[in-house]
């Protein structure tokens, strides 16, 4: 579904500098958008605003025909049905891979679990705990957990920053394959131009004012 | 920069405290050694006591003023002080051991922690049953364990002996604290001596059967429970009743005035008493001073102070009890030798456990 | 080039580790002294105990611990979650006010509540004056339920503190993830937060459990037969050391076993992701009604746990003030602060060293070490006291020739008659309190900063002092507050181990309270409470205010 952001304003404290000042953006259905920028320019904040974790932003955000926020209304994060893969993946350390993925499902079904394990090539690792996985496996677990909730929009924060650079090529391919197979609208932020070039259909450069 | 500062601060703090610890122990050493080295050494006596009344402190001050002997004090619980004396053995610093129960005094004696004292003053001032038969320890104040009742509900004519309290007519009316109270243990020990183990056990079982509620709280709480109507009769010490009548809380005073004291067993073996007393520690380094302090405590001035300040009965015949105590009347005391309370303590505790006195 | 100057010999065990183990052996000496007296042969006293007291002691202790853990756990977690996850008016005030009930010693709370609810207490008196007829049994607090209540309202801050700081620092992304996935607060609590806080929660519960198991004041006053009261009665009451030592030994074994079971149940799961990089949680604003509801809830609770009892003590203190001898107050305050601060600083320093070295130890020996530092906490204070005297008399015996060398007239029991013994005993008893906060802090930052510093040519210990300690400042401060408060309100150790003429606040409280003069006891007790409260305020200020290192 199409994501539209219009005239976004945001600052952390009333006295702080504005991070966004009339920012607008739109992403077509099924498109992968990369937001590129140096650290501290507000990339991650943008994702937190879209997801609804940051409640103090002004402006309007729509996905498809659903308005998430505008002057009058604010849909809380729990009801937005957005997928968010955090930079450190935020896997629950006390749950196994399977439990983590099922955590994302509204109705746990083993059929869906198998599909996701297949898709993310995690077969055989279901009973491992996150700290027993490699970085790439952790990332795919987080992705699987997010996809399990069948989100209307996927947000990814620095997908490769925690990973071994030798493997990045392969991981990029995997990631692109998985996202494209799901035909899901995606916004990812990164500081790495190569990542952006490889993965994205469209790139937005964000700079600190 | 900040990080550095914090660490530095911590390091300085640590060294400072360490140094201080060193200093405080050396300074202690200095004063102690000074006291021993000089010709005109200041005299002192080291006291372990489980009596902890402000009035006692003023007595010790008076003693110092009179004799020039300084009194150094460790206050603690009697049983733990006995344990400390045992552990310190021959090296102990303590010269005199004072506690508020004859049973404990006997235990100190039987653990070979005390030594006999031959003092005419002590013998003359203290009645024979209130001191150890071999003069290891001496009692210097008395307390009686009496019956306290609700004036509006109980006719004192119905009260007679401790044994009478086991009569089924008092079912659900008797209030008394738990079996861990040394006062209850000593009371039962005196009964073992007077009526034999079998009958003492029957008595304890009878009290348990008549209890108004599971035993809890201290002596004062028993009196309050009478006032609250939970029961009609309490077994408690005169001392605490005196405290309540002079409570700083007017309500407590008012409530206590509805209660009265009854001395049981007046036609029989007499009301149970216990003493506070002291003995000179076996390995005392300042034995003479310790004896002087004991004699002082058995003397007229100290006896008067005990009577006035603390709702206790003096042991010296020539000193009167306080007006409050006198108003309750004089009474016949148990003549049981108080050493027996100590000897029979273990038996008493076991009986209390066996009859389910919680 | 200066590599050659340093020793390059490969050591199997580092001096650091050896030193840590040496510390642990030293602080366990009193416990060894006690345990070495255990005698398992059956005798009359043991049989008597088994027949008449065992059942009550075990079942009362069990229920007391179980229900106290439940209630204090619920209170502690509830407030920790509210404070960590939500923003509401006056939060910055309430955040630390919720710590303050820990400043009231449980036995004081027991006396105060029993006094308030008694026939002459404020509540029954008011009801009488309004003509309401209350059955005194309804207000009876001197029973097992009452003890659970007293322990819970005075001990829950152990849980509150541990859980709150864990949530604030570690759960940000995890909680956000669950929210993005559509989890509502209640489900989020059950599925994510509860399992996540397992370690700090269990840590806090363990502290509460050990406090309850070894406490003697409350159960004695309420006359509840527990393991601890039985230990006291059989040792100090009957002079029967055999039963008492055997019992304390069993209690200790039970506590170690419980911890072991928890360790096993945790299995392979982890609760903190290794990098420790979780972002701090972002609290959600509670607007309107909900915000006020939270304020009312906390205010009510603080009223019950702190304001009401302390207010009552103030009234009593004013009634009895003229009877209280305060002539040496300065000296008493000085004495109190000296031993409290000395012991607290020592405990923290030792704990820092142990937690620091633990990081390079095999998991198992590290675990054994951490359990060994906590043994003292599971034993009643008076037992530790006796063990400590035994050890110090022996040390003085050994060192006497040395004392003589410096001062020919020196007495033999030099250390045992100074505050060294008192401070040492506190270190033995309260290592566990400091250990939790210090150890979890070191475990959290791992070895990476230390390694980094080392590659820059700074030794491990120096790196710890210069880099890691400042980073851990807030944890150290928490450890300091908790330890200090525990020591200042402790009674049996102070009572038995102090030198001649060494009066402290706790000993003054005891002298009055033991005599059932709670009104008079309120005066020194209030001073203890104000000092601890001051410590809380001061240190909360330092940790959150300027000049502090900002938490990530």
Image (cartoon, rainbow, N blue to C red):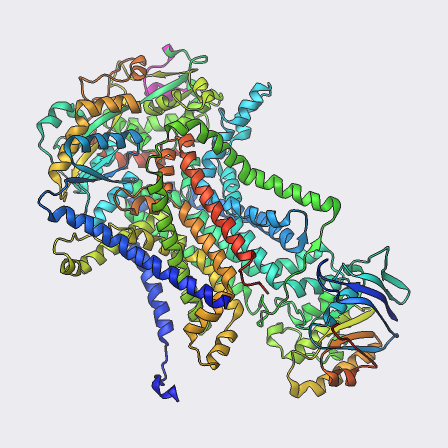
Q: Give the range drawn in magenta.
A: B157-168
Q: Is residue C516 left or right of residue C440?
A: left
Q: Indicate the position of residue A204 as horizontal and vertical percent values.
A: 81, 77
Q: What is the quadrant of the N terminus of chain C in the image?
A: bottom left
Q: Is residue C431 above or below residue A200?
A: above
Residue B344 visible to the viewer = no
Q: Is residue C71 above or below residue C440?
A: above
Q: In this view, does B47 lie above or below A45?
A: above
Which corner quadrant of the image does residue B53 belong to?
top left
Q: How many labels does the image show?
A: 0
Examine the structure image and report whether residue C124 is included in the region drawn in magenta.
no
Which corner quadrant of the image does residue B182 belong to?
top left
Residue C280 visible to the viewer = yes
Q: Indicate the position of residue C404 as horizontal and vertical percent values.
A: 14, 58
Compare residues C405 and A168 and report the one nearer the observer.
C405
Q: Indicate the position of residue A198 as horizontal and vertical percent values.
A: 78, 85
Q: Which residue is drawn at 45% across and 44% down?
A: C531
Compare residues A128 and C103 and report the one nearer the observer.
C103
Q: Is residue C380 left or right of residue A70?
A: left
Examine the structure image and report whether residue B160 is included in the region drawn in magenta.
yes
Compare residues C269 and A29 and report the one nearer the observer.
A29
Q: Indicate the position of residue A136 as horizontal and vertical percent values.
A: 67, 80
Which corner quadrant of the image does residue B313 belong to?
top left
Q: In this view, does A30 lie to the left or right of B136?
A: right
Q: What is the quadrant of the C terminus of chain C in the image?
A: bottom right
Q: Is residue B295 above or below residue B151?
A: below
């Amino acid at each position: 579904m199409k994501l539209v952001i219009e005239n976004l304003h945001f600052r952390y404290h009333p006295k702080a500098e504005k991070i966004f000042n009339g920012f607008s953006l739109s992403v077509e259905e099924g498109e992968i958008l990369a937001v590129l920028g140096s650290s501290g320019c507000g990339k991650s904040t943008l994702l937190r605003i879209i997801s609804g974790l940051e409640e103090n932003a002004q402006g309007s955000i729509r996905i498809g025909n659903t308005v998430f926020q505008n002057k009058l209304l604010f849909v809380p994060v729990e009801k937005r049905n957005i997928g968010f893969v955090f930079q450190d993946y935020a896997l629950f350390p006390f749950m196994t891979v399977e439990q983590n993925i099922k955590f994302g499902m509204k109705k746990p079904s083993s059929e869906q679990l198998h599909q996701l394990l297949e898709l993310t090539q995690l077969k055989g690792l279901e009973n491992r705990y996150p700290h027993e996985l490699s970085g790439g496996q952790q990332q795919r677990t987080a992705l699987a957990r997010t996809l399990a909730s069948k989100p209307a929009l996927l947000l990814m924060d620095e997908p490769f920053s925690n990973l071994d650079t030798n493997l990045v090529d392969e991981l990029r391919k995997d990631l692109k394959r998985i996202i494209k197979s799901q035909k899901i609208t995606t916004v990812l932020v990164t500081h790495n131009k190569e990542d952006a070039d490889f993965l994205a259909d469209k790139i937005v450069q964000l700079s600190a004012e | 920069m900040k990080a550095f500062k914090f660490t530095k601060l911590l390091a300085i703090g640590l060294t400072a405290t360490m140094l201080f610890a060193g200093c405080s122990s050396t300074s202690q050493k200095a004063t102690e050694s000074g006291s021993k080295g000089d010709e005109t050494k200041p005299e002192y006596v080291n006291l372990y006591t489980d009596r902890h009344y402000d009035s006692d402190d003023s007595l010790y001050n008076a003693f110092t003023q009179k004799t020039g002997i300084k009194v150094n004090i460790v206050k603690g619980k009697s049983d733990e002080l006995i344990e400390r004396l045992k552990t310190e053995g021959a090296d102990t610093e303590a010269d005199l051991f004072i506690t508020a129960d004859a049973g404990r005094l006997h235990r100190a004696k039987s653990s070979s922690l005390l030594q006999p004292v031959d003092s005419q003053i002590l013998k003359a001032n203290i009645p024979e049953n209130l001191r150890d038969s071999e003069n290891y320890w001496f009692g210097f104040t008395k307390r009686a364990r009496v019956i306290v009742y609700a004036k509006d509900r109980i006719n004192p004519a119905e009260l007679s002996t401790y044994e009478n309290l086991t009569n089924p007519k008092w079912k659900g009316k008797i209030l008394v604290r738990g079996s861990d109270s040394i006062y209850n243990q000593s009371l039962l020990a005196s009964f073992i001596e007077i009526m034999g183990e079998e009958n003492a056990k029957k008595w304890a079982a009878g009290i348990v059967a008549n209890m108004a509620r599971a035993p809890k709280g201290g002596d004062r709480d028993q009196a309050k429970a009478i006032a609250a109507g939970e029961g009609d009769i309490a077994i408690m010490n005169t001392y605490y009743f005196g405290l309540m009548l002079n409570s700083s809380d007017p309500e407590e005073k008012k409530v206590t005035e509805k209660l009265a004291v009854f001395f049981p067993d007046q036609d029989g073996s007499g009301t149970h008493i216990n003493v506070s007393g002291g003995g000179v520690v076996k390995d005392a380094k300042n034995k003479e001073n310790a004896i002087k302090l004991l004699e002082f405590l058995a003397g007229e001035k100290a006896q008067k102070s005990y009577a006035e300040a603390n709702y206790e009965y003096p042991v010296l015949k020539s000193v009167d009890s306080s007006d409050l105590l006198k108003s309750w009347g004089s009474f016949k005391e148990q003549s049981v030798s108080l050493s027996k309370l100590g000897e029979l303590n273990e038996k008493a505790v076991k009986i209390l456990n066996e009859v389910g006195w919680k | 080039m200066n590599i050659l100057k340093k020793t390059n010999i490969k050591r199997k065990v580092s001096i650091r580790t050896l030193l840590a183990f040496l510390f642990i052996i030293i602080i366990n000496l009193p416990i060894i002294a006690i345990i070495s007296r255990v005698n398992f042969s059956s005798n009359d006293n043991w049989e008597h105990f088994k027949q008449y007291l065992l059942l009550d002691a075990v079942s009362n202790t069990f229920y007391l611990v179980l229900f106290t853990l439940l209630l204090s756990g619920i209170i502690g977690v509830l407030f920790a979650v509210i404070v960590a996850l939500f923003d509401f008016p006056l939060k910055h005030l309430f955040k630390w006010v919720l710590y303050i009930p820990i400043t009231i010693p449980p036995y004081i709370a027991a006396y105060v509540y029993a006094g308030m609810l008694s026939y002459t207490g404020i509540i029954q008196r008011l009801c009488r004056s309004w003509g309401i007829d209350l059955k005194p049994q309804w207000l009876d607090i001197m029973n097992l339920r009452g003890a659970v209540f007293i322990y819970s309202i005075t001990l829950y801050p152990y849980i509150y503190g541990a859980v709150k700081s864990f949530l604030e620092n570690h759960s940000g992304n995890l909680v956000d993830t669950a929210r993005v996935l559509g989890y509502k607060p209640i489900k989020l609590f059950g599925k994510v937060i509860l399992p996540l806080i397992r370690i700090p929660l269990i840590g806090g519960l363990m502290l509460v459990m050990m406090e309850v198991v070894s406490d003697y004041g409350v159960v004695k006053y309420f006359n509840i037969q527990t393991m601890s009261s039985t230990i006291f009665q059989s040792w100090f009451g009957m002079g029967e050391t055999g039963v008492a030592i055997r019992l304390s030994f069993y209690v200790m074994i039970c506590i170690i076993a419980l911890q072991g079971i928890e360790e096993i149940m945790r299995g392979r799961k982890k609760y903190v992701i290794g990098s420790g990089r979780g972002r701090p949680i972002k609290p959600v604003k509670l607007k309107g009604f909900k915000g006020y509801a939270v304020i009312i809830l906390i205010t009510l609770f603080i009223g019950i746990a702190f304001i009401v009892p302390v207010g009552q003590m103030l009234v009593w203190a004013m009634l009895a003030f003229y009877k209280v001898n305060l002539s040496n107050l300065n000296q008493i305050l000085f004495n109190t602060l000296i031993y409290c601060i000395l012991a607290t600083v020592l405990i923290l320093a030792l704990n820092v060293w142990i937690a620091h070295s633990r990081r390079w130890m095999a998991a198992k020996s590290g675990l054994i070490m951490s359990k060994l530092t906590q043994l003292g906490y599971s034993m009643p204070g008076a037992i530790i006291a006796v063990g400590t005297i035994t050890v110090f008399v022996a040390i003085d015996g050994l060192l006497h020739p040395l004392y003589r060398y410096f001062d020919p007239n020196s007495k033999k029991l030099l250390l045992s008659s100074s505050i060294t013994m008192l401070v040492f005993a506190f270190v033995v008893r309260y290592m566990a309190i400091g250990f939790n906060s210090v150890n979890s802090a070191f475990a959290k930052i791992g070895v990476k900063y230390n390694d980094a510093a080392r590659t820059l040519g700074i030794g491990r210990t120096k790196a710890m002092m210069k880099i890691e300690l400042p980073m851990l400042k807030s944890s150290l401060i928490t450890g300091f507050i908790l330890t200090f408060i525990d020591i200042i309100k402790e009674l049996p150790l102070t009572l038995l181990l102090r030198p001649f003429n060494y009066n402290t606040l706790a000993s003054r409280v005891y002298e009055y309270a033991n005599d059932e003069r709670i009104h008079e006891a309120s005066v020194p007790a209030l001073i203890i409470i104000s000092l601890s409260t001051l410590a809380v305020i001061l240190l909360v200020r330092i940790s959150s205010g300027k000049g502090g290192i900002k938490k990530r």
